Amino acid sequence: MKVELYTLCDFAQENNGKLTIVGTFDTIVAKVFPMTHQSFALAVRLRFDIWELGIHSFKIEARDLDGNSYVQPVEGTLTIRDVGNASSVVHLLYSFMDLKCKMPTVINFILYIDDKEITSTPLYIKAAAKKS
């Protein structure tokens, strides 16, 4: 299995196997804390080889460096089917609402497949520079 895409973005959708992603980012700058970011998405594109056909479990967590969770973990299963090619592609798209942070931090969005950590991407929550 290969991760072809794993990104945070403003919006993502799939239409007939095509993935549309708008506004990929890794940093949110807040004017004040505590802060709430109203909405964002996580877009994932996974490619499975033919010998990986079958059912696979997945989980996505969002944790800071101290292990604190920021969103409800997303869990499920993927059924990889033979599509007549040497590999098969799966898209996972999740929208998150009202991310709350009390202070600047780094939140890692971690992907597990079959209980193994596969990849992660950081979300940096920073304070806006004070005007002098």
Image (spheres, helix red, strand yellow):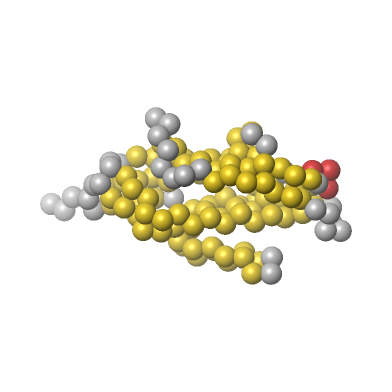
Residue found at the far top of this picture: 66
In depth, the one of 107 and 29 nearer the eye is 107
Which residue extends farthest right? 84
Classify 76 as above or below 22: above
Image coordinates of residue 56 in percent, x first then y, are 71, 42
What is the x, y in percent for residue 120?
54, 41
Asked whether 121 or 83 is in front, the reply is 83
Report x, y in % for residue 111: 58, 42
Instruction: Inspect this view and state whether residue 66 appears.
Output: yes
User: Where, quadrant-wise, is the N terminus in this rendering?
Assistant: top right
Q: Name, please, the residue furthest toward the bottom.
A: 16
Q: Residue furthest left?
A: 132
Which residue shows up at 79% across the image and 45% down it?
A: 54
Question: In the shown orientation, is residue 75 left or right of residue 71?
Answer: right
Quarter-of-image position of residue 119: top right
Q: Residue at x 80, y 46 (%)?
A: 53
